[in-house]
Amino acid sequence: MINITLKQLRYFEALARHKHFGRAAEACSISQPALSMQIKEMEEALGAPLFERGARQVRLTHFGEVAAERARDILRAADELGDLARASRDRLVGRLRIGVIPTVAPYLLPKVVGELTGRFPGLDIHVRETVTPKLIQELADGRLDTAIVALPVSEPTLEETPLFEEPFVLVRSAREANAPLPNADTLREMRLLLLEEGHCFRDQALSFCNLPSGPPREVLDASSLSTLVQMVGAGMGVTLIPEMAVPVETRSASVAISRFETPEPRRTVGMVWRKSSPLAGQLMEIADIVRSAADGDPLHPGPETNDNLQA
């Protein structure tokens, strides 16, 4: 009988994902020699090499590619067994891995994490902030329990539950505060600053302006809303941001914020998790907490509480 441990499978999966011993060891919080030794022992137990080792990178062998898929299935099943045990308890405890898109994380997470730790003292929250495609893949691989993203994601293996709807606002230089409000047609002719490709918020902004997402635009593509707002303040163009980001991102920028006329662009933010997750009941409870935090978040004012927000 082949003797392989779950620990070895986790190290193997990390190395298959990162394709680099140093980064995989860091992800597993062990030393590189220890990781290397565990992989070597696993290969000896299987009687076949899992990786081709190069000077700077490792590559899966054909057998390694097949084994990596099986390893992910085994690890996902093992995690779900642990989730079953957690789901049988009265209160949610242990590790909870939450993914959040970057256009939500800085503005909503502080209150959400505070609410969750107050409600569930035994909860060990791990947060992963990245773009939607990566979050969906990590959910499918069992590396996340749930994710807060813009809906819909339309993945048949995932459960979706809406949390709240949020409008987009226009950010212009303060010098343009009294200029007529542009509509979608006018925005197409303006220098529209956007998040870089991979961010769902970029696609939503392009959709509102009826602009293609494929060809590169001759403007700045930024990795954060903060950069976009600062560049607008410097007179480089205009941008759209979600309303919840306004208080944080406009504090130190010379910009004017305007609401669009009806129908204004907006997004639906929601939570997703695997339909097979034993934690579905607890995750629905967490969704209620996130929804309440968003509804009552002082960092998420409506136009009546923000003098800089114009209709």
Image (cartoon, rainbow, N blue to C red):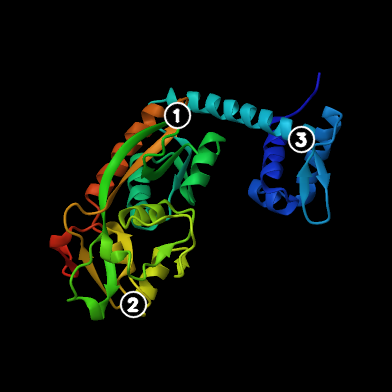
Check the picture and name the quadrant holding the N terminus. top right
| Element assignment for label 1 | loop
Q: Tag 1 or tag 3, which sits nearer the N-term?
A: 3
- Amino acid found under the numbered disc labelled 1: Pro
State whether residue 49 is above or below residue 277.
below
From the viewer's perspective, tell me whether residue 196 is left or right of residue 22: left
Residue at 78 percent across and 25 percent down: it is: 3
Q: State the separation of the CA atoms marked 2 and 1.
A: 42 Å
- Amino acid found under the numbered disc labelled 2: Gly
The residue indicated by pointer 2 is 233
* Residue 156 badge: 1
**Pointer 1: residues within 10 angstroms few (<14), some, or many (20+)?**
few
State whether residue 74 is above or below residue 230.
above
Please name whichever residue, 263 or 38, is drawn nearer the observer in this view of the structure. Answer: 263
What is the x, y in percent for residue 66?
Answer: 72, 30
Please name whichever residue, 278 or 18, is drawn nearer the observer in this view of the structure. Answer: 18
- Amino acid found under the numbered disc labelled 3: Gly
- The residue at the far top in this view is 1
* Residue 255 badge: none
Residue at 16 percent across and 69 percent down: it is: 307
The residue indicated by pointer 3 is 64
| Element assignment for label 2 | helix
From the viewer's perspective, tell me whether residue 65 is left or right of residue 284: right
In this rendering, does residue 110 appear at all? no
